[in-house]
């Protein structure tokens, strides 16, 4: 199942990146089993309806790397990985939300659970998660969204979510 | 301690008074040609005499408890600071197969008319043509708000509000179960949240987005760039899966949902939302006016308002407490003020997490500038105790603020001031549509 998912993602990626880049990306985190926040960076392929990656830049950040993914719709996704290649924080901006099911991995379910429709009664507040082991802050309005998510137990020293 | 059922009930999700016994069985809408049977704000046509003739470029806005269907059942509640208008939708070309719909949420922060399927009469729903794609299949749409999304069919209908109308306008029917529209595509729900496919979920019978954009998606949907504010789908009877390209036409036949105001024949460059001042305790209901067009008639001039151009995202900069918040905006679809200020006391009562409860009403201000530094004004506005100040029955309440990060968030992100409905009280807020010249300045811009 996992292998099949990976194949699907890579197939989706093929249209956006040259093969050498694709291979390099696949090798980046050989020891990380699953994708998404807390997993490997290859999550970035996502659903093409929401995440067509036009450019992928990798720069050093806090002992790990910052992956900046420019999306075709003008949006941007940043993924911060530690030395082991594990994504400990993400940040997104753009006219549509990215594939958060892929970007957040297993934490997507937590975001849904902490922001039920009933919470909307009488108050229209942007979704958020404020748990000891997971922080998510979102905002914006229709046509321009942003959000950040990080794992407090996994962030390196010096990490500042406001500086992402 | 005074009783404040209104706001408290909203926040706590309690069952409010059993008003449903009075009106729960009546439909939220009425049939052809008649006005709604609900009490306030139901007048759909508006006119006034002025100088050279009768003006019809406006509609009444009401802020009240919301549609009857909101306050029904164990999850019933009343609306808070939600501006509503009344509209009429007819089958294209028909003057008899029509429906007047009250309690349509007036949202200056989004684009497009979206109606709950359950609100529409079956005879009208079936007479609103489903738009088709090149494959001959129906077109579906996923549209995202900051908290949740709506999914449903794209249809055409003759639309009227006040004295303005649009023939064969593209609109969305939320929660349409016709054909293949009944299942939300995975790529729609992967943006987070839920489908607001009931009146209680949406907080309204429908929502009319009259924001800064002329259409609801733009180039992201007319190419294959992935989602913009919307994702359009090819919807054979087996379900909606593939994304479909939709052009950017600003006239019928529309391929994307237009801003209804942008689609008017005249008075189509923006709106002015004028709401009255409201005392600190709030009111059961208030009425205001939305004017269509800016500088096009004798009733919609710029006056002394300051034009504040927005950036491409519809953002302006609000400098608050010395911090430039570059993702700020005015939004009638936000029912409170949403901003971070860790120096103001927050409410400690259960269910009021994140609400501000200053011991005395504060007068706050923010220095606002537009894109490229154009436009500069420093408005002030009140912030009151969200728990103790509002009266029990108030549905329109000034000065309510919320920290979107809630209390005790150790790493607050301060980049936005969302000026919701409390800011609109006692003001005229101008929203000029992108690409349209309004009062000599091309939109998008806000004016206050």
Image (cartoon, grey):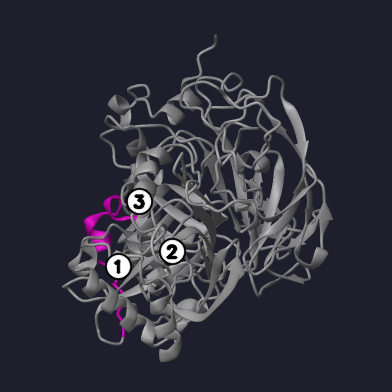
- Residue under the point 71% across and 44% down: B427
Q: Nearer the viewer, residue A127 or B12?
A: A127
Point out the stretch of residues depicted in magenta: B116-133
Q: Tell me how far mark 3 sits from mark 2, CA to CA.
A: 22 Å
For residue A143, above or below residue A21? above
Left or right: A148 in relation to A48: right
Pick the front one: B118 or B325: B325
Q: Is residue B36 above or below residue B234?
A: above
Does residue A60 appear left or right of residue B178 in this picture? right
State the mark number for residue B128: 1
Q: Is residue B55 visible?
A: yes
When the figure is inspected, residue A23 is found, relative to residue B52, above or below; the finding is: below
Q: Earlier in the sequence, mark 3 or mark 1?
A: 1
User: Residue B266 occupies which quadrant of the picture?
Assistant: bottom right
Label 2 crowd bin: few (<14), some (14–19), many (20+), radius 10 Å: many
The quadrant the C terminus of chain A occupies is: bottom right
Q: Position of residue B435 (x, y in %)?
A: 65, 75
Chain where mark 1 sits: B
C-alpha span from label 2 to label 1: 11 Å
* Residue A124 position in % (x across, y down): 49, 43
Tell me: B112 left or right of B193. right
Tag in front: 3 or 1: 3
- Disc 2: which residue: B159
Residue B252 in sight: no
In the picture, the disc for residue B196 is 3
């Amino acid at each position: 199942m996992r292998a099949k998912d990976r194949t699907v993602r890579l197939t989706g990626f093929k249209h956006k990146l040259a093969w050498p880049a694709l291979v390099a990306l696949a090798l980046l985190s050989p020891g990380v089993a699953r994708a998404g926040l807390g997993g490997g960076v290859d999550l970035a392929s996502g659903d093409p309806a929401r995440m067509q990656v036009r450019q992928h830049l990798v720069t050093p950040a806090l002992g790990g790397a910052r992956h900046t993914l420019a999306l075709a719709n003008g949006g941007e996704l940043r993924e911060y990985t530690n030395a082991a290649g594990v994504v400990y924080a993400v940040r997104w901006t753009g006219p549509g939300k990215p594939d958060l099911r892929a970007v957040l991995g297993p934490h997507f379910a937590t975001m849904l659970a902490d922001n039920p429709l009933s919470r909307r009664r009488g108050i229209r507040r942007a979704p958020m998660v404020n748990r000891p082991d997971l922080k998510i802050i979102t905002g914006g309005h229709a046509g321009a969204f942003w959000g950040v998510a990080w794992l407090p137990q996994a962030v390196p020293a010096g990490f500042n979510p406001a500086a992402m | 301690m005074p009783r404040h059922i209104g706001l408290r009930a909203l926040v706590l999700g309690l069952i409010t008074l059993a008003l449903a016994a009075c009106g729960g069985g009546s439909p939220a809408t009425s049939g052809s040609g008649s006005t709604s049977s609900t009490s306030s704000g139901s007048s759909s046509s508006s006119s006034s005499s002025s100088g050279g003739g009768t003006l019809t470029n406006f509609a009444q806005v009401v802020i009240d408890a919301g549609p009857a269907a909101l306050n029904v059942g164990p999850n019933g509640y009343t609306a808070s600071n939600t501006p509503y208008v009344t509209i009429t939708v007819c089958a294209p070309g028909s003057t008899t197969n029509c429906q007047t719909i009250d309690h349509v949420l007036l949202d200056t922060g989004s684009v497009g008319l979206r109606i709950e399927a359950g609100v529409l009469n079956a005879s009208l729903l079936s007479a609103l043509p489903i738009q088709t794609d090149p494959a001959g299949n129906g077109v579906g749409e996923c549209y995202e708000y900051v908290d949740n999304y709506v999914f449903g069919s794209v249809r055409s209908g003759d639309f009227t509000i006040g004295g303005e109308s649009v023939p064969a306008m593209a609109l969305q029917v939320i929660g349409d179960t016709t054909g293949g529209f009944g299942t939300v595509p995975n790529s729609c729900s992967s943006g987070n949240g839920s489908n607001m496919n009931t009146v209680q979920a949406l907080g309204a019978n429908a929502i009319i987005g009259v924001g800064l954009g002329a259409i609801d998606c733009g180039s992201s949907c007319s190419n294959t760039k992935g989602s913009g504010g919307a994702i359009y789908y090819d919807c054979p009877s087996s379900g909606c899966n593939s994304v479909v390209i939709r052009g950017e036409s600003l006239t019928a036949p529309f391929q994307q949902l237009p801003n209804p105001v942008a689609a008017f024949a005249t008075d189509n460059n923006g709106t002015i939302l004028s709401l009255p001042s409201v005392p600190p305790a709030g009111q059961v209901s208030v009425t205001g006016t939305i004017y269509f067009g800016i500088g096009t008639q004798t009733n919609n001039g710029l006056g002394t308002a300051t034009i504040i151009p927005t950036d491409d995202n519809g953002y302006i900069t609000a400098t608050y407490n010395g911090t430039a918040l570059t993702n700020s905006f005015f939004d009638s679809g936000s029912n409170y003020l949403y901003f971070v200020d860790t120096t103001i006391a927050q409410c400690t009562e259960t269910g009021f997490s994140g609400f501000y409860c200053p011991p005395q009403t504060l007068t706050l201000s923010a220095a606002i500038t537009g894109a490229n530094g154009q436009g500069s004004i420093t408005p002030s506005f009140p912030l009151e105790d969200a728990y103790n100040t509002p009266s029990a029955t108030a549905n329109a309440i000034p000065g309510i603020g919320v920290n979107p990060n809630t209390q005790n968030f150790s790493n607050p992100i301060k980049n936005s001031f969302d000026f919701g409905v409390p800011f609109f009280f006692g003001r005229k807020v101008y929203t000029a549509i992108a690409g349209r010249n309004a009062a000599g300045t091309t939109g998008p811009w806000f004016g206050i």
